Image: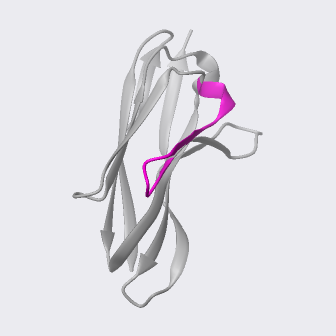
C-alpha cells in the first residue's frame, strides 16, 4: 500500500506565508508526479501545482507566482511554500501523487487534506 502524509497548513493572515509538506511511503516503485490540489467550500477541487518526474512544473492560474513547489526524489517528498497569501486561498489542500507500486500498478493517491485558512 501507499500512503501520503501531509503536514503544515493552519491559519495565516493576508500577506503571510505557510509551508505544506507531504511524504509518500509504502510499496513505491516509481513516483511519476507529485503535487497539490485544493478545494474551497462549494467549489471544485483545483490544481495548485505539480512536479512531473522530469522536473516540469504545472501550476494553476490562481497562484500567480506566489507559491513555490519543490520535490525531493530521495525522500519521496513534495513541499509547497505559499507566500503572499490571500483570503481566497482558504481551502483544504490535498497532496496528490501518481505512483507505480512494486506490483506494477499505477494509480493516483491522495493525502487526507490539510486546512489552510487566511484571514483578511
The question of residue 56 being in magenta is answered with yes
Q: Considering only vertical position in the picture, is 35 above or below 5? A: above
Which image quadrant for residue 28?
bottom left
The question of residue 108 being in magenta is answered with no
Q: For the view shown, which residue lies furthest in the bottom direction?
A: 103
Q: Tell me, yes or no, if residue 111 can be seen here.
A: no
Q: Considering only vertical position in the picture, is 84 above or below 26? A: above
Near-viewer residue (84 or 49)? 49
Q: Quadrant of the N terminus?
A: bottom left
* Residue pictured at 41% horizontal, 81% vertical: 101
Left or right of 47, for residue 71: left
Which image quadrant for residue 11?
top left
Q: Quadrant of the C terminus?
A: top right
Q: For the view shown, which residue lies furthest in the left direction?
A: 74
Q: For the view shown, which residue lies furthest in the front direction?
A: 54
Left or right of 103, for residue 64: right
The percent coordinates of residue 83 (x first, y second) are: 43, 18
* Residue pictured at 48% horizontal, 9% vertical: 15
The colouring scheme, among rainbow, by chain, secondary structure or one colour, is one colour
The percent coordinates of residue 21 (x first, y second) are: 34, 43
The percent coordinates of residue 36 (x first, y second) are: 51, 46
Q: Which residues are magenta?
A: 51-63
* Residue pictured at 48% horizontal, 26% vertical: 67
* Residue pictured at 42% horizontal, 13% vertical: 16
Near-viewer residue (88 or 47)? 47
Q: Considering only vertical position in the picture, is 37 above or below 65? A: below
Left or right of 47, for residue 2: left
Q: Considering only vertical position in the picture, is 38 above or below 19? A: below
Left or right of 44, for residue 105: left
Amino acid at each position: 500500500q501507499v500512503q501520503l502524509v501531509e503536514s503544515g497548513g493552519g491559519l495565516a493572515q493576508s500577506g503571510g506565508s505557510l509551508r505544506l509538506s507531504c511524504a509518500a511511503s509504502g510499496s513505491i516503485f516509481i513516483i511519476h508526479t507529485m503535487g497539490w490540489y485544493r478545494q474551497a467550500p462549494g467549489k471544485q477541487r483545483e490544481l495548485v501545482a505539480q512536479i512531473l518526474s522530469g522536473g516540469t512544473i504545472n501550476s494553476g492560474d490562481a497562484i500567480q507566482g506566489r507559491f513555490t513547489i519543490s520535490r525531493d526524489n530521495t525522500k519521496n517528498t513534495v513541499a509547497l511554500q505559499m507566500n503572499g497569501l490571500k483570503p481566497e486561498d482558504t481551502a483544504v489542500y490535498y497532496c496528490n501523487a501518481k505512483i507505480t507500486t512494486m506490483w506494477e500498478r499505477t494509480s493516483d493517491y491522495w493525502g487526507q487534506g490539510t486546512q489552510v485558512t487566511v484571514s483578511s
